[in-house]
Image: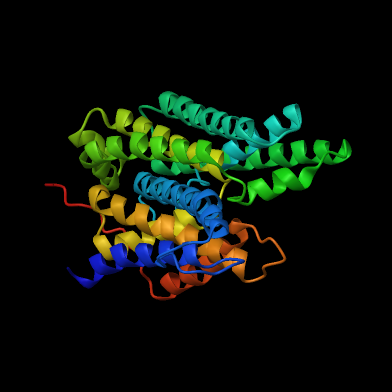
Amino acid sequence: MNKNTFFIIIMPLLTLVTALEFGSTSFSIFQSEWPAVFQEGIFRLRLTRVCVAFFSGSFLAVAGVLSQTIFQNPLATPTVLGTASGASFGAVLTFLLTGSMGVSIGFGATSGALISTSLLFWFIKIQKHNLEVGRLLLFGIALNTLFSAMSMLMISILLSKEINVPDIMYWLYGEVAGKGSTEIIFGFLSFFICLIPLLLFSRPIDKLQLGMNLAASQNRKVHIVLYFCLFMIAALVGSNMFLTGFIPFVGLIIPIISRFLRGNRINNMLLPSVLLGGSFTVAADLISRTILKEIPIQIGAMTAVVGAPVFIYFLVQDRFQMTGIKQGD
């Protein structure tokens, strides 16, 4: 086992164990007998919180891998495509219409992500014979700006009606508290539904790193592959929004680290991205609930605080290359 494999496997395990043991009350999960209050704390509260954070981070990390592959750019994230802002808009609109949090917000966010992706599909269709990555990028930025502005409009309406806006604001910046079995089951199902197809179609996806024109010359169905990737990004971001709300920096930092450790191929990056993305989010949640125990800190704020220095480090070290794959592969 080389050091990279050791890091990818051991670090997530250590993070998960630490997250279960530490919090407002610390204890060892390896003790022979647990008091009833600790059993309640682990199995119904802390374990649920850790699992939801892990699923959410892994979804965003894989969505980041796909985004960077499509744009052949290690700085691309799901936000570039407008998928995340579309999901946020769907969530805010649902909250405006229903006035309640819960499962309905998750469905609203997923619907928003799918609407944004449908607009991307439409753009690809009308640009089919003149499609360039730069054009898709600009269209995604336009969608991101549009949906972000519409979300702010909805929030302004909520403020004018004196509705409890902090609830939706907390959720938009990542909220893993108060989750239950519904989120756990949803996370497991989404995990396998999304990851298995990506593993099966990893080779055609790899071809996108050659650029649209060259990929099209090797595979006439490159547009179908692109549609598939965009749909999977929407499904992953929608699943993340259903569970916790959007969490920044995970979809940017983790694919860069995975690529640095395991190379550029999709099938080599998926498992590291899942493990590192999940453990990164769990670690951020652990810090957010222990650094100031009496003040709740949103997990999204903590991932940004932790992720920004890591991003700066890779930027200074000039480790943003996407070497691509050989044409003969």
Q: Is residue 310 visible?
A: yes
Residue 273, quarter of the rendered image = bottom left
Q: Nearer the viewer, residue 4 or 26?
A: 26
Residue at horizontal 72 percent and vertical 64 percent from the top: 295
- In this view of the protein, which residue sits in the foreground, 149 or 86? 86
Which residue shows up at 21% across the image and 41% down it? 203
User: What is the image's colouring?
Assistant: rainbow
Camera-side residue of 293 and 197: 293
Q: Quarter-wise, where is residue 259 in the image?
A: bottom left
On-image quarter of the N terminus: bottom left
Asked if residue 154 lies left or right of residue 321, the reply is: right
Left/right placement of residue 13 relative to residue 205 reads: right
Image position, residue 45 (x, y; %)? 56, 52
- Residue at image coords 25%, 61%: 262
Q: Is residue 75 visible?
A: no
Q: Position of residue 318 (x, y in %)?
A: 38, 71
